[in-house]
Structure formats: structure tokens, C-alpha cells
Image: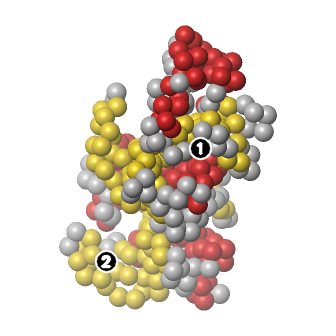
């Protein structure tokens, strides 16, 4: 059973049970319409007193979990976190959380999840904690990855909300896991003589859509046919999910003077053990012929080699895409051969770059 008087201290928070002393704060939250309290929390003032006296504690009394308030150094409730679906015989539970809208973006959810899961595994003797988050909820996915959970898979159409069915990502944390955040490449701005390479934003979607739909892009890359803004939005979200899992990274290249989009560059298939990755890029139709792609790829390669100790960067291009092959060669890549039937049955020319090539 969970201790009714549990108190868990983290660097900036205290996780403790809700109680009658929280009446004024809960009243303020209910009146504001902020939604982050545990399931069953009152949406009317009249429901606050019975919820604080009884309702919020029913989960603990059943032995299936516990609802805790996240309070800051001043004792203000800034969020809520829960364990639920606890099976003592199996040694498993699930964690869920919410942060007040005014306190989001400060890493409080990650801190609370780390604190509560460490207590559940180390003190309460549980062996596994589940966490689920909607595939399109990047903030919650980021919390799970930073808290040391392992991305285990996607449950398709697993939850039905007002706007329809959504996929859920299943995460797991085991007692013997190292509980360290996934190794990732940081969101970083890089500059060349003519370019600003910055993290992607939703504002890039229109230009990405035009670039992806361009006949040359369609002919020589694996982007979906009929590429449109929906595809581009999906790509931006997918690229960020890959980054937070340590599997990739993506940049938008723009002209610093005008802010105009000129290309997209991404890293994929990152292998942290071998320190290798593959690079790909799409140059906007209006920016081709200026050498931007080679300039961007070379700068990202230098950053990977010098700042993150990578040993190899691979680049593949269609045999008929002579422009992309020129990009590789001008950036210093060495042609290694042809990988047969690599992309939809199409051969690809393989190039590589290693640190000594940039010396």
C-alpha cells in the first residue's frame, strides 16, 4: 500500500498528498479553467471540499495508486502526478502527470516523474513503470525520454478523444534501467559564410511542402508522392520525435539577410555506439545552383566530428542525380560504390565522410 503521508523532495519540487489546506489553491485552479489535475477532480466549486477530503484519496485507499500534488519552493501547487493501475503481485504501475499552464516549459514534469519513479522503484519495490503519451504530444514524449523511459512501441488508434482516434506511444522503465535520458543531439544553430542552419519550426511547413512536391525532389528522393503541407507537418513532428529518441536531427537552412528558406538537412540512422549517421537534404527549387547544400552538409559534418566525436557520415544519391553527387564530392565525401535496390528498387551511390577528410 502507498503511504498516506508520503513526501518526495526533488531539486525544485515537493510531491505530497492533496489535503483540505489546498482548498484556496484548488478553488483558484477550478475558477481559471486550467486542466491538469488528476482524473475525477472537480470542475465546480461545490465539489472541491469532498474531493479533497475523500475523492482524491480513493485511489490510494484501493491500493491501486496515489495522486500527489507538485508544489514549488513556496508551497504553490504547480502540477499533479499520479501512479495508477498498480499491481503489487506483478510489481507494475503506470505514471501520469499534468502541469499548470503557467508553469509549463520549465522541466517540472520531467523532474517530478524522475522523483516519483525513483521512489516507486527503489522504496516501494515495484519493478516496472509504464507511461503512455499521444504520438502527437511532443511535450509529453519529451518528458518520457528525458526521464529515462524506453520507447517500446506505438499503439495504433489506442485512444479516442473529441477530435478522433489517436496513436499512443508506450514507454517503460524497469528497476535495473540506468534511468538516464536518451542520448540526443541538441537543438543547435550553426552558421556558415552564407547560411543560418537552425532547428525546424512549423513556419517552415509551406516551403517544405513546395520543396517536397517539386518534380526534381520527387524524382530523386523517397518523399511521398503528392507531397503537401500535411506531409510536411508530419515530417517536422517525426524529425523531432527521432531527435528526442537520439535517432536523428534536422535543420532548416535560410539566408541570414532575408530569412528565406533555402534547404532542409537531416541526420538519420544515428548509431551512438559506432558514432555514425547518414545525412540527407532537400534544396528549394529557387535556391538550387548556389552550392548551399554542400556548404550546409560540410558544416554539420564538422560539428558532428568535432563536438560529438562522430567517426563517419554517410550520404546516398540516385545514380541519375548528378547534382546531388556533385554536392557530396564538393563537400569532401568519398565515393564508395553502389548499393543495389536501396530505395524502392532503385540503386543508390554511396559516399562517406570521415574526420580526416576535413583536415
Residue 129 relative to residue 90: left or right? right
**Image coords of residue 194 (percent x, y):** 64, 61
Q: Residue at position x 40%, y 89% from top?
A: 336
Where is 43 relative to 89, above or below? above
Q: Position of residue 231 (x, y in %)?
A: 35, 47
The residue carrying pointer 1 sits among few (fewer than 14), some (14 to 19) or many (20 or more) residues within 10 Å by Cα, namely few
| Secondary structure beneath label 2 | strand
Whole-angstrom CA distance, mark 2 to mark 1, is: 61 Å
Can residue 329 be seen?
no
Left or right of residue 300: residue 77: right
Query: Residue lying farthest top?
Result: 46
Q: Foreground: 348 or 113?
A: 113
Q: Nearer the viewer, residue 253 or 117?
A: 117
Circle on res. 3: 1
Marking on residue 348? 2
User: What is the basis of the colouring in this image?
Assistant: secondary structure
Give the quarter of the figure containing the C terminus. Answer: bottom right
Residue 253, image quadrant: bottom right
Amino acid at each position: 500500500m502507498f503511504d498516506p503521508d508520503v513526501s518526495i523532495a526533488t531539486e525544485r519540487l515537493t510531491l505530497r498528498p492533496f489535503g483540505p489546506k489546498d482548498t484556496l489553491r484548488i478553488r483558484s485552479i477550478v475558477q481559471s479553467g486550467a486542466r491538469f489535475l488528476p482524473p475525477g477532480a472537480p470542475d465546480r466549486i461545490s465539489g472541491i471540499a469532498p474531493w479533497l477530503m475523500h475523492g482524491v484519496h480513493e485511489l490510494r485507499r484501493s491500493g491501486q495508486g496515489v495522486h500527489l500534488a507538485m508544489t514549488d519552493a513556496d508551497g504553490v501547487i504547480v502540477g499533479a502526478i499520479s501512479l495508477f493501475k498498480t499491481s503489487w503481485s506483478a510489481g507494475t504501475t503506470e505514471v501520469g502527470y499534468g502541469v499548470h499552464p503557467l508553469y509549463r516549459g520549465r522541466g517540472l514534469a520531467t523532474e517530478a516523474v524522475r522523483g516519483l519513479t525513483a521512489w516507486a522503484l527503489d522504496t516501494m519495490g515495484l519493478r516496472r513503470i509504464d507511461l503512455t503519451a499521444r504520438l502527437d504530444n511532443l511535450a509529453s514524449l519529451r518528458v518520457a525520454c528525458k526521464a529515462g523511459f524506453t520507447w517500446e512501441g506505438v499503439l495504433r488508434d489506442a485512444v479516442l478523444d473529441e477530435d478522433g482516434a489517436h496513436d499512443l506511444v508506450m514507454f517503460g522503465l524497469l528497476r535495473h534501467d540506468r534511468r538516464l535520458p536518451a542520448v540526443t543531439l541538441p537543438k543547435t544553430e550553426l552558421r556558415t559564410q552564407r547560411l543560418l542552419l537552425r532547428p525546424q519550426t512549423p513556419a517552415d511547413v509551406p516551403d517544405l511542402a513546395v520543396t517536397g512536391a517539386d518534380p526534381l525532389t520527387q524524382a530523386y528522393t523517397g518523399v511521398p508522392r503528392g507531397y503537401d503541407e500535411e506531409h510536411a507537418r508530419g515530417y517536422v513532428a517525426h524529425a523531432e520525435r527521432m531527435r528526442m529518441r537520439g535517432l536523428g536531427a534536422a535543420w532548416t537552412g535560410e539566408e541570414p539577410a532575408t530569412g528565406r528558406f533555402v534547404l532542409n538537412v537531416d541526420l538519420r540512422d544515428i548509431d551512438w555506439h559506432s558514432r555514425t549517421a547518414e545525412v540527407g537534404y532537400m534544396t528549394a527549387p529557387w535556391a538550387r545552383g548556389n552550392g548551399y547544400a554542400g556548404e550546409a552538409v560540410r558544416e554539420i559534418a564538422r560539428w558532428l566530428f568535432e563536438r560529438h566525436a562522430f567517426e563517419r557520415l554517410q550520404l546516398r544519391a540516385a545514380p541519375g542525380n548528378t547534382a546531388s553527387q556533385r554536392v557530396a564530392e564538393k563537400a569532401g565525401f568519398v565515393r564508395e560504390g553502389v548499393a543495389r535496390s536501396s530505395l524502392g528498387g532503385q540503386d543508390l551511390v554511396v559516399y562517406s565522410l570521415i574526420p580526416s577528410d576535413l583536415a
